[in-house]
Amino acid sequence: MPLLTLTDRGLYCEPGDFYVDPWEPVDRAVITHSHGDHATWGSRAYLTSEPGIGVLQARLDPTAKIRGVRYGEAVSLNGVTISLHPAGHILGSSQVRLVHRGEVWVVSGDYKTDPDPTCTPFEPVRCHTFITESTFGLPIYRWPPQAEVFAEINSWWRFNASVGKTSMLYGYTLGKAQRLIAGLDPSIGPILTHGAVERMTATYRQAGISLPTTHYAGTAERRADSSDAIVIAPPHASGSTWTRRFGTQSTGFASGWMLVRGARRRRALDRGFPLSDHVDWPSLLQVIEATGAAEVWVTHGFTGPVVRWLKEHRVAARAVQTRFEGERDDEIVEGIEEAKLGS
Amino acid sequence: MRLFARLFTAIDETNATHEKVAALVAYFRGAPPSDAAWAVHFLIGRRPKRLVGSRKLAAWASVEAGLPEWLFDESYQAVGDLAETITLILPADGVSSELPLSRWVEERLLRLRGEDDDVQREVMLRSWRELDRRERFVWNKLITGSFRVGASQRLVIRALAEVSGVDEGVIAHRLMGDWEPTAEFFQRLLAPDTRDADLSRPYPFFLAHPLEGEPAALGQAGEWIAEWKWDGIRAQFIRRAGKTFLWSRGEELLAGRFPEVEEIGALLPDGTVIDGELLPWSDGKPLPFAQLQRRIGRKNLGRKILEDIPAVLIAYDLLEEGGRDIRSHPLSQRRERLSSLVGTVASAGRLLLSLSLPFTTWEDLGDARRAAREVGAEGLMLKRLSSGYGVGRRRGDWWKWKVDPLTVDAVLIYAQGGSGKRAGLFTDYTFGIWEGNHLVPFAKAYSGLSDEEIRRVDQFIRRNTLEKFGPVRTVKPELVFELHFEGIQPSTRHKSGIAVRFPRMARWRTDKKPEDADTIETVRALLKSVTREEQT
């Protein structure tokens, strides 16, 4: 009997009687992070990392019962020891470590190893069985140095400002938007935000993350004075009437998907900035090796190629189909989230 | 290579036409003419014959990257472009290259031809190691010969016109036919003396607007003529100073593609320009368009294909007579002259006058339109007798009145990823219709859905995949689409025994269940009704 099994509600730990990131309401849910495909409403009790309480509360019903634990702090549920360890994906994101009768399992959730000033850095955790995401599990995905990407974003913004164009930068509301804001050079001009981004950014600030000043774009005077601004907005706002108030603009999207030209072109964007909150191919393999796991379950992304690669390198591996299997594009997830936020 | 890669990036990073043109202008002004000539060559879509097979490129790049080939193939499926896949998997960038484009092409690219594998491999590896990521991509694009980069021929022409001050039409003419991309050529391309181009230059085509609603709104039926609207290649036939030029509407010179039609040129007086349609034609009626496509695809037209698929020019209009531009004359006059001209030419049936269909009331015409499919036409053209021959697509005097498309409700059964812009999304679908209680593949369609719908269907496919066969997925039969198409024919090459022309998704029928989709019997009946003429 494995410690975790895949059920139609998600990953279930039978001895502990709880779920990890269930996609339907359950009694006890351990949440890796607050993105819509990992944190769903309606469960009776949630366990998440302490730094993640604020964002999770913002995403769920305000009355949801959430317990926070410090990273590394062990709690016990029906004889299963649970601890959460930083995943470096977004604020409060965790890997879930489970110990039962000496057997150690780790569920990665989404993670990245690149530094990010808006969340605690990833820590590898040794285990027997590792359940990993594989969103960017192909060798074409190798992130350029982050400093280079931010330098490109800032110089794009600087150039647009010099020719009187507003820079429209799209990125996911929770996590990516704040990471972008943290990396912008505020000396270029004002940073404006879409309502959904502004609300989430406020939640980050309440959690003690320091970010440059932003202005809610809803209060900005129509067309006035936005030509040297950068506007941070969720991808679904692209092409909407909301964007028209900013006049002449250049559009950009920050996402790992932007590494591939076709992904940018089909959105008819001017610029794509390959900035991801997931591990790229080399980091994925390094992390798997660092866990020392004898068995690897691969989920959420390019499961097939990653499993085959691992098997060819003598690692026992299998694909685990989650409900969001093959969610190649986070856009739909984001769409669900925005719908929940009612924005 | 650096300058050219920079140009590529500039074009690629904007959707604004004027910014693309500005980038091209800056490049053409700054680049040495020998480079600029090659840039023009590649940007307008010319390319050397495939020099290195894609399988070989994939293999060498995989080895260089330390990856097994199956993983290369998986990567390729996600990217949808060979040149880009190679660029993305290769190890760390080299330094950027100062070597000019012309030398990259002449000393490396062209030298690959006919070399054995080891030499080709050596050149490719060396080149990859010398170039940075952007340059590698451009280089790979040149090698794989698919250099479409969002700058159409039109934009290149516009930029060259701006650089030289020469008319766009002249530039277009100079880019026709055979030329070698040399510095001398580039200088000739921009030369201010334009006499060279005048002889072959076509007139801009006059295009019809689709008629929505009934023709009664056009006024008196007697002020109009009606002709069949043919589904061929719209073309201008020019005879001047003893030379013949055949142009397509895409402003492509069709030299050598329709020899039997070009031969008619010798029978026409100098200073003649005819607007017409090239059609595959046999026994007094058109062959299906697919037949013409077989001809278009070929570089060398053998005797057999010329016999099997003979082409004719259906003459619609006369634009120039005796060297005089008569486009402003009323259509009634132009047609009269065209008719007498065609009557005097012994063209052996290869130059035909477009019929003016007899009708007295608009109701008569409705009947003719319904018969269009039976004669192999797409519908009717309505033209005002007093109209001049205008420029571009304008409302008022010329209308196309197409027959209603044929329609079938079918179920999505297979899906495949798109390429290019649609890479990574399931956008290419196969639809089935019921034969008894199973679904038989009936048509493939790629177009007609909005981006939002594509995303939703893509999502459905990912969650409802039954099996994977390479890139193809079989999908739970649940989604119903209303397909439209223009023609339907019996076929031995299709499982359903039926082939349709130009199928597209007209609507996603979210109101229908799979069991509501059409059956093979209803589709056969449709086929019968459309082709009853031929069967009786």
Image (cartoon, coloured by chain):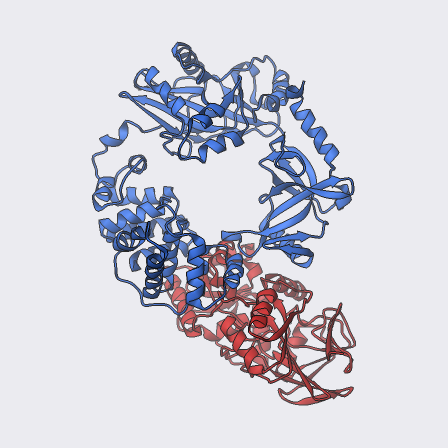
Q: Judge by depth and name the residue closer to the eye, B82 or A192.
A: B82
Looking at the image, is B454 positioned above or below residue A213?
above
Q: Residue at x 35, y 28 (%)?
A: B202
Q: Chain B drawn in what color?
A: blue
Q: Is residue A80 visible?
A: yes
Chain letter, colour red in render: A
Q: Answer with the quarter of the image where residue A10 lies.
A: bottom right
> Is residue B326 visible from the viewing direction of this image?
no
Residue sitting at 40 percent across and 22 percent down? Answer: B260
Compared with A187, B487 (above or below) is above
* Lateral position of residue B299 relative to residue A126, left or right: left
Of residue B32 and residue A105, the one placed in the foreground of this image is: A105
The answer to which image quadrant residue B371 occupies is top right
Q: Nearer the viewer, residue A339 or B438?
A: B438
Residue A114 position within the rendered picture, expressed as x and y whole percent measured from the top left: 49, 77
Q: Would you place residue B448 above or below residue B247 in this image?
A: below
Horizontal arrangement in the rendering, residue B312 relative to residue B102 (left or right): right
- Estimate the x, y position of residue A229 in percent, counting from the top left: 44, 65
Q: Nearer the viewer, residue B93 or A343?
A: B93
Work out which quarter of the rendered image holds the N terminus of chain A and state it: bottom right
| Residue B66 percent location from the top left of the image | 45, 69
Q: Quadrant of the C terminus of chain A?
A: bottom right
Task: Report whether A107 appears left or right of B381.
Answer: right
